[in-house]
Amino acid sequence: VPYDEVIQHGFVSSKNWPEVLVSRDVFPILRTIARSHKISFRSELEDDPLKQQIIFYAAIIYRGHLLWYQRAGEQMTQLPQEMLGDERLRGKFSIGVGGHKTEDDILSVEGDFIKLTFPLVEDELRAMIGVNRGLLAEVEEEIGIRRQHFVDSPHVLGGFMDRRNVKPEDLRYQHPVGFVHLALPTIVEISPDAGQLTFSEREVVWAGWVPLGKVEEKLEEALASPYGVDSWTEVFIREFLPLYLQGLQ
């Protein structure tokens, strides 16, 4: 999605980090994604901050607890390094579940109902339903919970772009991950009968539930650890989780 179009929807500097742009203006962002999205190869997008790749970044909540996990790192598994995913995230603690959406997510929405009932916004509706379906499929795949055990629909809380240049002296980080991705912080609640979560052993070495009232304490503990925290997790907790908690009061 063009950066020039999404930036118009209420993005301001975070009170915690001036280089992190945040917006709580959810629906205009989603409409812009639906209307202006294009499908392209990731290899063509990774160094182009004018084209924002859309990432739903979902936090999982179960009976007043937030899911945390720790990604596998070099010293935590016998697997070769090339199987451990993005080196910038290895070993870090995180709450985020999600990933890139594909052309299949959009094209998977079929049927004549949308075309006959909403002909003027057919493409937009197909795009948004497809992206939503892609998010739910991602959650199913990453934690092993079927969507019939999700409570209501995902709660999209806004958007953020993390423009912090982590290692400006390193050419590999000329456009860090946050420069080319628009994150959509999302809450997914799962029901009490959801069953046991399952994770890929090559990606996750630990997972556990933290009471919502102790999330800040867990964040400080993880930040102080030798492994650190996925930077998007910190943005989610500082900027967006309070919005969800206020809605519960």
Image (tube, rainbow, N blue to C red):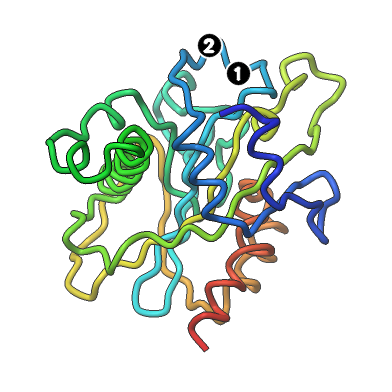
- Left or right placement of residue 172 versus residue 29 in this view: right
Q: Circle 1 sits in a helix, a strand or a loop, which is it? A: loop
Q: Residues within 10 Å of mark 2 (few under 14, many from 20)?
A: few
Residue 247 location (% of width, % of height):
52, 80
Where 206 falls versus 56 (above or below)? below
Residue 91 location (% of width, % of height):
56, 41
Q: Residue at x 67, y 35 (%)?
A: 178
Residues at marks 2 and 1 touching, judged by CB atoms closer than 8 Å: yes
Q: CA distance from mark 2 to mark 1?
A: 6 Å
Q: Circle 2 sits in a helix, a strand or a loop, which is it? A: helix
* Residue type, numbered disc 1: Glu
Residue 2 location (% of width, % of height):
62, 27
Q: Quadrant of residue 60?
A: bottom left
In depth, the one of 189 and 224 nearer the eye is 189
In depth, the one of 38 and 49 nearer the eye is 38
Residue placed under numbered mark 2 in the picture: 43
In depth, the one of 80 and 179 nearer the eye is 179
Residue occupying the far bottom of the picture: 249
- Left or right placement of residue 12 versus residue 157 in this view: right
Q: Quadrant of the N terminus?
A: top right
- Left or right placement of residue 21 versus residue 108 in this view: right
Q: Residue at x 26, y 63 (%)?
A: 150
Q: Residue at x 30, y 30 (%)?
A: 106
Q: Is residue 28 visible?
A: yes
**Tally of numbered discs:** 2
Where 148 falls versus 34 (above or below)? below
Q: Residues within 10 Å of mark 1 (few under 14, many from 20)?
A: some
Where 184 falls versus 149 (above or below)? above
- Left or right placement of residue 197 versus residue 66 in this view: left
Disc number for residue 46:
1
